[in-house]
Image (cartoon, coloured by chain):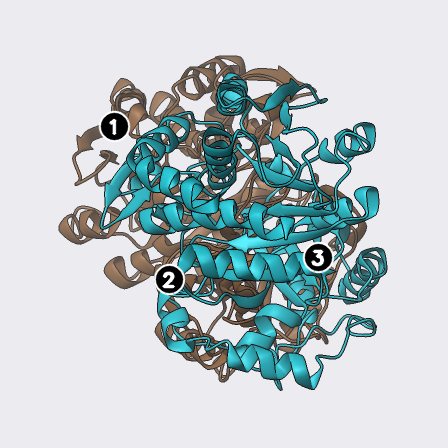
Chain colours: A cyan, B brown
Amino acid sequence: MIDKTVAYIIEHADANIERLKELLRIPGISTDSDHKADIRTSAAWVLKVFTDCGIDAEIVETAGHPCVIADTGPVEGDGPTVLIYGHYDVQPTGDESLWDSPAFEPTVRDGKIFARGSADDKGQALTHLFAAEAWMKTAGKTPIRAKFLIEGEEEIGSPNLGPIVEKFKDRLACDYVALSDTPKLDKNTPAITYGTKGMVYKEIVVTGPSQNLHSGSFGGVITNPGNALALIVNALRDSDNRVTIPGFYDGVRTITEEEKRRMNDVGFEEQAFLESMGAPALTGEKGFSTIERRWCRPTLDVNGLFGGYVGEGASTVIPAKVMAKVSMRIVPDQDAATISAAFDKAVHAATPEGVHVEILNHNECPAYVCSLDSTGIKAAERALEAGFGAKPAFIREGGSLPILALFKEKLGADSLMLGFCMPDCNAHGPNEYFGIDDFHNGTKAAAHLLAELAR
Amino acid sequence: MIDKTVAYIIEHADANIERLKELLRIPGISTDSDHKADIRTSAAWVLKVFTDCGIDAEIVETAGHPCVIADTGPVEGDGPTVLIYGHYDVQPTGDESLWDSPAFEPTVRDGKIFARGSADDKGQALTHLFAAEAWMKTAGKTPIRAKFLIEGEEEIGSPNLGPIVEKFKDRLACDYVALSDTPKLDKNTPAITYGTKGMVYKEIVVTGPSQNLHSGSFGGVITNPGNALALIVNALRDSDNRVTIPGFYDGVRTITEEEKRRMNDVGFEEQAFLESMGAPALTGEKGFSTIERRWCRPTLDVNGLFGGYVGEGASTVIPAKVMAKVSMRIVPDQDAATISAAFDKAVHAATPEGVHVEILNHNECPAYVCSLDSTGIKAAERALEAGFGAKPAFIREGGSLPILALFKEKLGADSLMLGFCMPDCNAHGPNEYFGIDDFHNGTKAAAHLLAELAR
């Protein structure tokens, strides 16, 4: 049966690309309330893919943007049930002048389709929808029962996914969650991501005088909030790029020798990786390799800085208020709440006399890692090899997917993360893209996944 | 003669306030090209004050906004010639919602006139014009030859004042420059400012990756420009609030015991000063008093910070580029060029591996200090006492007036800085004001100054 299904996918390759373009043209930016209607249009578009091929589907309202829930219904045999997760909302475009073609006018160049959401996650999510559709069109059913949860709030942190999963616990019940919202290892190697970092995202706000002051008349006699902020932020790391927050590393699981070996075997190309970032050098925590730092070590990064005069030229103010957004990526078994509290304590301890400090909490989620020995992971491995003609790499991800912990907690299911797009796909930057071949191979792999899980 | 002149000033007090209001209504913001016509209207208004009372005056074009040059012409006797400097341009209003009455609708409350430019410098400059006018109206001449240079670009750093002074060197030749663009010591004490700090204003730009990167996928493996900037900025000062740039203090003139005594005698009220700033505490360089820090010690301040995500909530980017505006106030005998070079060297030395750093130079001017023993200073002292009925304080100023060094260099003249407005007059902030009594007393003092210089 799979041959017919794959043949159908190959036959409809161009049509699938045209349909992907259709969805990419809808500017469903979830963080921007001006695009609320576009989010709804996207949901309706997704719904139609399901209903057109005979899969039951429904738009489900949430406290924010709606999601789409679909279900093929029970199938014969004792195969597992899979819940395929994806999201149709996208990041803002950022500075549009940095895009070589408009973010919402999908454009094909060099075998890649450029558009906001092409990789993250419209393109990758659609592979699973088109794979299920191919099964429905060729076999009249999917090899296993497939459920779908496609949401519209991933890029704003999935605030309503928890309530939805809780509410529809039974309806969404599954043995595995499958999703494609992570990248390949490199051009030739699809990937299964088996671990992600968690996150603790903070904002440090330092205030001093009641308003901006003249730095001549008032310089040197009060603590400058800008200087204080530099001091505080700098106190959080040392010259070995280790985080200095007391207790920060207490919960970190040691990397086993086997995992180290597996990571090194992955054939990670440091030079190409560095070039893709455009940074002057690879640096990082002393005592660890680049791949270890990326996949297994917790980090602390400044994400934003603001305060005082930021226009052209000079203005001699002592800023009344400055802020730094600082986030930490945490790893198993660091506890987010513990790290959050330790961060606050360290910031207060570092704050010099003469300023006030306030800490805002923006985001907090645990890390995730799953066993590589499950039948689901084995099935995913075979599916990727069948779809891409290459053995997948097992990788971990520095990013955070709070939904993984959510699915594990609410549904008891581990997640199979199949990566089809390139690691330098510019997911949140300008010129986001998804390789055309990767899109088609991903669709084939998604079709194989349903067959392999049935075995 | 002075009695008649002072009587004239008293008699015309209300009329002078009305005329000040007229000028204050013209929104001559020099930094904003939308207000170019207002600058010209202001210049014409100033010109008319001179010509109406029989003082030769002319609007002189520059490469930017025009200035007004006036001259009473030679007078009998061997008194010195004074060049009175002022500026009719003003700062932007900033956030207009913070003003209790509109910035360009002068409003009298509690004996103060509130408007942008009331103190800085329209109000203070007009005292000298109205004083000269009173002499012309009552004596038909001024006691000494008085020249005037009233410019329209002070708030943008007087970019064309150098060329103008150079070009009209002979026409502007003088023994003393007199100006009122500095404050009183406190409510009861007018002040003569005899020293100002110089400035070296820099912008540190740190770049890393070629674009903002996802802090999950790329955190921990490259140097984050935001963290690097915090490190660099923090490396410029130590925990004693001393600047750590090698050689920074080499040129600093030691404060003499006499000057220390004089500073302490000034009766500076620390608590009131702290309250006026609204900061939590007075802090500063270890080993010096607040007044010493403010008047005589060099400083280093962050003036602005920017980079990465600065909107609401969280966005997990590693910023590609961040910047800090950092300025130093320097004192006699620090050399601006030497300090500038030492700063650059220190920044480069502190820059960690993995980022590029670029340093922009925005501003550089030397400190200024003059002897307290000149006949000009003595005359100014007597004039202030006569005008305000209180002995003036001799103060130094943390701010910078690059024009002082310019006048010294081009005209060989020291500057007499007579302060009439309150130190908390909000010169560059919302609700700028000038006390009505201070305005009248200042006008009287300015009239006395011409008489005292003639003695």
Instruction: Read off the chain for label 2.
Output: B
**In the picture provided, is A32 more to the left or to the right than A63?**
left
Gap in Å between the C-alphas at discs 3 and 2? 50 Å
**In the picture provided, is B443 more to the left or to the right than B187?**
left
Instruction: Read off the chain for label 1.
Output: B
> Percent from the top left, x then y, of residue A285?
61, 79
Residue beneath label 3, please? A198
Instruction: Read off the chain for label 3.
Output: A
Residue beneath label 2, please? B365
Foreground pick, A299 / B132? A299
Residue beneath label 1, please? B55
Under mark 2, the amino acid is: Cys
Near mark 3 (Cα within 10 A), the count class, few <14, some 14-19 or many ≥20, is many
Foreground pick, A75 / B113? A75
> Percent from the top left, x then y, of residue A349?
82, 66
User: Is residue B193 visible from the viewing direction of this image?
Assistant: no
Q: What secondary structure is found at the residue carrying circle 1?
A: loop
Gap in Å between the C-alphas at discs 1 and 2? 33 Å
Q: Earlier in the sequence, mark 1 or mark 2?
A: 1
Q: Taking B332 as reference, is B169 above or below it?
A: above
Near mark 2 (Cα within 10 A), the count class, few <14, some 14-19 or many ≥20, is many
Q: How many marks?
A: 3
User: Is residue A354 visible from the viewing direction of this image?
Assistant: yes
Under mark 1, the amino acid is: Ile
* Of marks 1 and 3, the one in the foreground: 3
Q: What secondary structure is found at the residue carrying circle 2?
A: strand
